[in-house]
């Protein structure tokens, strides 16, 4: 595995602006977003209760998820009415163009004291990158498992999301191999590959400038494993919709 190219707390904003992506360690996330790191395990337990994603066009049963929307305006975070997740075909050729209504994120997850800090912390990152404004946030809890042998974190392949900022937190890796993160310039030849393995490592992506994907995962032994992530997208001007 290639180790993540971690960047220090006082430099990740600058690297994100210069290169379009940055990888932040869990310790730096906790320090930068004022999170009590002892609370991480309690938050991660909410990934044990995710319904199956019934929209996978490859017929797979390897992805489980919940989805909810929020608006961050300054230091205020409010939950938006539950809505379908929608992406245009230009950004998601496999699942774009359809309204996908997923189960909402559980109230206990949203009430966890770390939740607001993470989302407001990301809104601050987006404002420093793009300018201060309200941010329309979609949060996705994902579990990719290997009960059927192969799990695909990004079945659509390398892609953009049609937003301003994408944040990918690794929540857990258990009994798997694979799951390499890959980031490429959207308009150039350069790219980087690495594997996030420390819980609450964060990958930040300027969605206008880079494309990203995660390679499939396989069981490491005889027992099925899984990879849990929290994917948060932030967009100015409103939520995406048809």
Image (tube, helix red, strand yellow):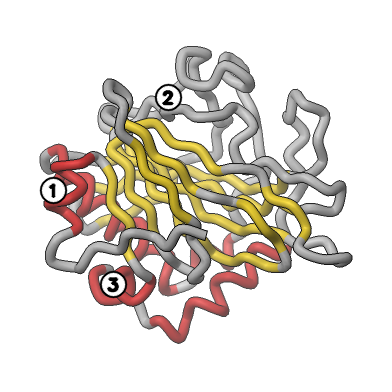
Labels 2 & 3 near each other (Cβ < 8 A):
no
| Helix, strand or loop status at disc 2 | loop
x 26%, y 56%: residue: 76
> Which callout, 3 or 1, points at the residue further toward the start of the chain?
3
- Helix, strand or loop at mark 3: helix
- Image position, residue 107 (x, y; %): 58, 61
**Mark sitting on residue 28:** 3
Q: Secondary structure at mark 1?
A: helix
| Mark 2 to mark 3 CA distance (whole Å) | 31 Å
Q: CA distance from mark 3 to mark 1?
A: 17 Å
| Residue, disc 1 | 128
* Residue at 58% across, 30% down: 84
Residue depth check, mark 3 versus mark 1: number of the one nearer the observer: 3
Kindly identify which numbered label has been placed on residue 145. none
- Of badges 2 and 3, the one in the foreground is 3
Q: Around disc 1, counting alpha carbons within 10 Å, would you say few (fewer than 14), some (14 to 19), or many (20 or more)?
A: some
- Image position of 94 with respect to 52: above or below: above
State left or right for residue 190 relative to residue 178.
Answer: left
Determine which quarter of the picture holds residue 24.
bottom left
Location of residue 62 (image quadrant):
top right
Looking at the image, which residue is at 57% across and 16% down?
Answer: 93
Nearer to us of marks 2 and 1 is 1
**Residue 46: x percent and y percent?**
63, 66
**Residue 182 versus residue 130: which sits nearer the camera?**
182
Residue under the point 33% across and 28% down: 238
Counting residues from the start of the chain, the first of labels 2 and 3 encountered is: 3
Image location of residue 91, percent across then percent down: 46, 20
Q: Is residue 44 above or below residue 142?
A: below
Seen in the image, is 39 located left or right of residue 74? Answer: right
Q: Disc 2 versus disc 1: distance between alpha carbons?
A: 22 Å
Residue to which mark 2 is pinned: 240
């Amino acid at each position: 595995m290639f180790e993540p190219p971690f960047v220090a707390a006082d430099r990740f904003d600058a690297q994100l602006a210069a290169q379009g992506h940055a990888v932040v360690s869990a310790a730096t996330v906790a320090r930068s977003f004022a999170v009590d790191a002892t609370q991480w395990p309690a938050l991660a337990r909410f990934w044990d209760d995710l319904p199956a994603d019934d929209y996978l066009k490859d017929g797979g049963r390897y992805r489980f998820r919940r989805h909810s929307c929020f608006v961050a305006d300054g230091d205020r975070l409010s939950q938006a009415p539950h809505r379908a997740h929608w992406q245009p075909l230009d950004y998601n050729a496999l699942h774009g163009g359809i309204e996908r209504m997923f189960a909402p994120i559980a109230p206990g997850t949203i009430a966890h004291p770390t939740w607001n800090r993470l989302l407001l912390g990301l809104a601050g990152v987006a404002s420093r990158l793009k300018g201060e404004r309200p941010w329309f946030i979609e949060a996705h809890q994902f579990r990719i498992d290997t009960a059927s042998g192969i799990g695909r974190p990004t079945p659509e392949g390398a892609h953009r999301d049609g937003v301003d900022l994408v944040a990918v937190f690794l929540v857990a890796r258990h009994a798997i191999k694979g799951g390499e993160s890959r980031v490429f310039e959207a308009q150039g030849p350069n790219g980087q590959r690495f594997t996030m393995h420390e819980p609450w490592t964060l990958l930040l992506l300027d969605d206008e400038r880079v494309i990203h994907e995660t390679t499939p995962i396989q069981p490491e032994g005889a027992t099925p494993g899984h990879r849990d992530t929290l994917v948060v997208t932030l967009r100015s001007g409103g939520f995406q919709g048809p």
